Amino acid sequence: MKFCLIVDDSDVIRKVAAKIVEEMGHIPIEAATAEDALERCMSSMPDLILLDWHLPTMSAMNFLASLKKIKAEVVPEVLYCVTEADPIDLRSAFRAGIGDFVLKPFDRNTLEPKISRLLEVVEAYANA
């Protein structure tokens, strides 16, 4: 089982994502703010982070920069959750370290394959 941190200010998005993650056999952890998510990462780094592109008090880019400063054995993969696929924003996000992105609103059919692929990357790094 892998730990998946879901960072989104929307209760609905967090609950939908958490249900999908849990049904995939992984452990969902929820955070409504970037600050809460960073605190959780400092205490125990998750394997995967589902990151909302628009957080109320900290940009996703600042979150990613702060995440890189946390010393941990696990380097999480990041799935960037966006409402539109703006090429400039996505390019910046990939440069900042995301592994993939998904458009919101998402469902099981769109989210599950992306989570599975990114967790395979985590597993490959762990076994290297």
Image (tube, rainbow, N blue to C red):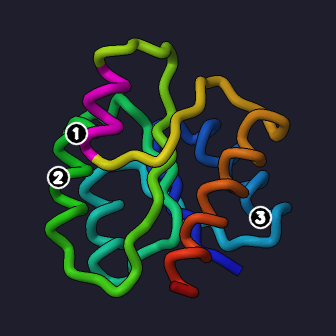
Point 47% across, 59% down: residue: 77
Q: What residue is shown with label 2?
A: 65
Point 82% across, 40% down: residue: 108
Q: From mark 3 to mark 2, how far is it between C-alphas? A: 28 Å
Query: Mark 3 or 2 closer to N-term?
Result: 3
Q: What residue is shown with label 1?
A: 61
- Horizontal and vertical percent position of residue 31: 44, 56
Q: Is residue 94 magenta?
A: yes
Q: Amino acid at mark 2?
A: Ala
Q: Residue 86 vs residue 71: left or right?
A: right
In the rendered structure, are the residues bearing label 2 and label 1 in contact, judged by CB atoms less than 8 Å apart?
yes
At numbered mark 1, what does the secondary structure look like: helix, strand or loop?
A: helix
Query: Mark 1 or 3 closer to N-term?
Result: 3
Q: Specify the segment rendered in magenta.
A: 89-96
Image quadrant occupied by the N terminus: bottom right
- Crowding at mark 3 (Cα within 10 Å: few <14, some 14-19, many 20+): some
Residue 90 vs residue 49, the one in the foreground? 90
Point 59% across, 24% down: residue: 103
